[in-house]
Image: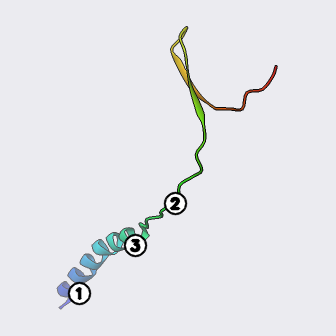
């Protein structure tokens, strides 16, 4: 009888984390963000790329 109880505890110990991981996964759906303009810039001298917000130029 002790063997059956030990086997049941072993199976429970193996299945418990799987149930907890499945319960921890949730899907969140976010609404779309407002449209923004961005400028993708390539530096030809060293092939670097960067993105900057469009329409927000400042005077230097």
Identified at 53% across, 55% down, the residue is 32
Q: Tag 1: Cα neighbours inside 10 Å, few (<14), some, or many (≥20)? A: few
Q: Vertical placement of 18 versus 53: above or below?
A: below
Give the mark nearer the N terminus: 3 vs 2.
Answer: 3
Secondary structure category for the residue under label 3: helix
**Horizontal side, residue 45 vs residue 57: left or right:** left
Q: Residue at x 21, y 80 (%)?
A: 7
Of pointers 3 and 1, the one earlier in the residue sequence: 1
Question: Distance between the Cα atoms at labels 3 and 1?
Answer: 26 Å
Number of the label disc, if any, that sits on residue 30: 2
Q: CA distance from mark 3 to mark 2?
A: 20 Å
Which residue ends up furthest to the bottom in the rendered image?
Answer: 1
Name the image quarter holding the N terminus: bottom left
Label 3 environment density (alpha carbons within 10 Å; few <14, some 14–19, many ≥20): few
Rendered image coloring scheme: rainbow
Q: Position of residue 28 (x, y in %)?
A: 48, 64
> Marks 2 and 1, how far apart in space?
47 Å
| Residue picked out by circle 3 | 23
Of label 2 and label 1, which has the lower sequence position? 1
Could you say whether the residue bearing mark 1 is in a helix, strand or loop? helix
Q: Is residue 43 above or below residue 17?
A: above
Residue that carries the numbered disc 1 in the rendered image: 5
Reply above or below: 17 against 50. below
Q: Quadrant of the C terminus?
A: top right
Which is closer to the viewer, label 2 or label 1?
Answer: 2
Q: x, y percentage for residue 41? A: 57, 22
């Amino acid at each position: 009888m002790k063997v059956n109880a030990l086997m049941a505890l072993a199976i429970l110990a193996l299945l418990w984390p799987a149930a907890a991981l499945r319960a921890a996964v949730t899907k969140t759906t976010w609404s779309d963000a407002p449209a923004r303009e961005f400028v993708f810039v390539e530096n030809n001298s060293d092939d670097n790329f960067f993105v900057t917000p469009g329409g927000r130029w400042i005077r230097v």
